[in-house]
Image (tube, rainbow, N blue to C red):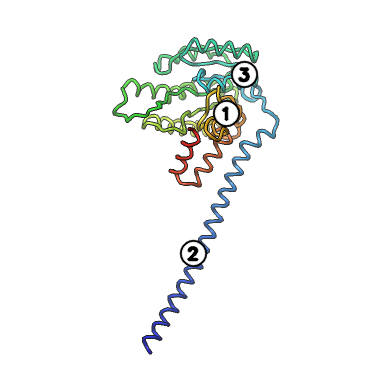
C-alpha cells in the first residue's frame, strides 16, 4: 500500500512539474512565433517601401539630382549596356568604358541616335592594371560626372580551385573585379565631393551563381567597400549603392524557366534598379529578386538552392 501511495505521489509531482514546463515552453513558443511574425512583417514592409514607393512618387530628375554625365564600366555586357541606355533615357550623357572597341562604338552611336544625348567611350582593359587609369582620368577631366556604375567583372561559369587557376587569371580577377571599382571611385569622387552630389553603384554580378574562392572574396570585398564608402561619403551628399542582382535573362528573351518574373531581361531589370537609386544602399534592384531573398531567409538553404536551380532551367 505504501508503494502504491508513493507511486501516485511521484506521478502527481512529475505531472505537476511537466505542466509547469509545458506552460513555460508555450510562453517561449508564443514569444518566438511573435518575433518571427514581426520580422516577416518588417521584411515585407521594407520590400514594399523599396520597390513600390519609387513608383508612387514622381520620377526623380537624375541630371539635376546627381550631374550631367554618367560613367558605366563593363558597358557592352547585358546589365552594363542596359544601365547606359536607361540613364541616357533619363537625360544623362554617357561615358562607356570597356575593352571591346568595336562594340563600344556601336553602343555609343546607338545611344546617341536613340536618346539624343552626348556619348563617348574609352576602350581600356582593366586587367592591364595600373597603367590604364591615367588615360581614364584625363578623359573624365572637367566633366560633371554625377553617376558612376562599376559593372566591370570577370566570372567563371566553371569555378576552379585556387590551385588550378593560372596566375594571369588570378591577377585579372583582382584587377577587374576589385581594383577597377576602387580606382574608378578614386577618380570621380573629388569632383563629386566638390559639387556635394553624386552616386556610385557597385554591381556585383553573378551573385546567385557558384563562385570560386577568389571570385567570392571579390564580391565580399565590394560589399564591404560599398558599405564603408557610403558611410564615409554620406556627409558629402554622395550616395553609394551595392547592387546584387540574381538571375538576369538575355535581352532577346525576357524570361526563362516556369516563372518568367524571376529572370527579367536586362532592360526590365535595370529599369527597376535605377528606381532604387537613392532609396537603398544595398539591394537586388528588382522586386522579384528581393522576394526570392526574403523567401530564402525562411526556408532551408538546400531547398532554396534547389528552387533557384529549378527556376533557371
Give residue 26's position: percent from left, percent from top: 52, 64
The numbered dot on residue 88 is 3
Residue 198: numbered disc: none
Q: Secondary structure at mark 2?
A: helix
Q: Is residue 34 above or below residue 142?
A: below
State whether residue 218 appears in this view.
Answer: yes
Residue 202 lies, in percent from the top left, at 50, 27
Identify the residue position indicated by label 2 in the image: 25
Residue 230, horizontal then vertical, whole percent: 52, 32
* Neighbourhood count class around disc 2 (C-alpha, 10 Å): few under 14, some 14–19, many 20 upward: few
Nearer mark to the viewer, of 1 and 2: 1
Q: Quadrant of residue 87?
A: top right
Q: Vertically, is 38 above or below 6?
A: above
Mark 1 or 3: the one toward you: 1
Which residue occupies the extreme left position in the image? Answer: 163
Which quadrant holds residue 83? Answer: top right
Query: Residue at point 47% right, 12% down?
Result: 135
Nearer-N-terminus badge (1/2): 2
Total number of numbered discs in the rendering:
3
**Residue 6 position within the rendered picture, expressed as x and y whole percent measured from the top left:** 39, 84
Of the residues under marks 2 and 3, which one precedes in the sequence? 2
The reply, left or right, for residue 282 in relation to residue 305 is right
Callout 2–callout 3 Cβ contact below 8 Å? no
Give the residue number, with chain letter if any, for mark 1: 269
Name the quadrant of the N terminus.
bottom left
| 201 in relation to 259, above or below | above
Label 1, label 2: how many angstroms apart (C-alpha)?
46 Å
Q: Quadrant of residue 285?
A: top right
Depth check, front residue: 102 or 91: 102
Amino acid at each position: 500500500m505504501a508503494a502504491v501511495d508513493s507511486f501516485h505521489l511521484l506521478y502527481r509531482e512529475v505531472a505537476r512539474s511537466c505542466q509547469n514546463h509545458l506552460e513555460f515552453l508555450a510562453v517561449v513558443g508564443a514569444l518566438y512565433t511573435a518575433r518571427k511574425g514581426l520580422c516577416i512583417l518588417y521584411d515585407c514592409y521594407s520590400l514594399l517601401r523599396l520597390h513600390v514607393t519609387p513608383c508612387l512618387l514622381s520620377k526623380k530628375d537624375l541630371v539635376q539630382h546627381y550631374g550631367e554625365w554618367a560613367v558605366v564600366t563593363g558597358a557592352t555586357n547585358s546589365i552594363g549596356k542596359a544601365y547606359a541606355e536607361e540613364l541616357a533615357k533619363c537625360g544623362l550623357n554617357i561615358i562607356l568604358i570597356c575593352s571591346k572597341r568595336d562594340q563600344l562604338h556601336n553602343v555609343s552611336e546607338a545611344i546617341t541616335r536613340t536618346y539624343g544625348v552626348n556619348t563617348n567611350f574609352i576602350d581600356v582593359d582593366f586587367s592591364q592594371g595600373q597603367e590604364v587609369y591615367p588615360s581614364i582620368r584625363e578623359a573624365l577631366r572637367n566633366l560633371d560626372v554625377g553617376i558612376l556604375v562599376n559593372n566591370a567583372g570577370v566570372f567563371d561559369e566553371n569555378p576552379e580551385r585556387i590551385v588550378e587557376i593560372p596566375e594571369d587569371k588570378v591577377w585579372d580577377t583582382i584587377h577587374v573585379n576589385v581594383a577597377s571599382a576602387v580606382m574608378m571611385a578614386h577618380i570621380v569622387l573629388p569632383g563629386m565631393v566638390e559639387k556635394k552630389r553624386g552616386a556610385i553603384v557597385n554591381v556585383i554580378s553573378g551573385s546567385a551563381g557558384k563562385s570560386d574562392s577568389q571570385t567570392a572574396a571579390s564580391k565580399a570585398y565590394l560589399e564591404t567597400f560599398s558599405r564603408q564608402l557610403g558611410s564615409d561619403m554620406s556627409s558629402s551628399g554622395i550616395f553609394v549603392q551595392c547592387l546584387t542582382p540574381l538571375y538576369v535573362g538575355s535581352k532577346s528573351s525576357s524570361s526563362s524557366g516556369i516563372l518568367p518574373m524571376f529572370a527579367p531581361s536586362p532592360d526590365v531589370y535595370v529599369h527597376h534598379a535605377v528606381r532604387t537609386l537613392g532609396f537603398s544602399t544595398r539591394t537586388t534592384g528588382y522586386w522579384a529578386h528581393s522576394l526570392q531573398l526574403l523567401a530564402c531567409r525562411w526556408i532551408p538553404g538546400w531547398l532554396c538552392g534547389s528552387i533557384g536551380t529549378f527556376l533557371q532551367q
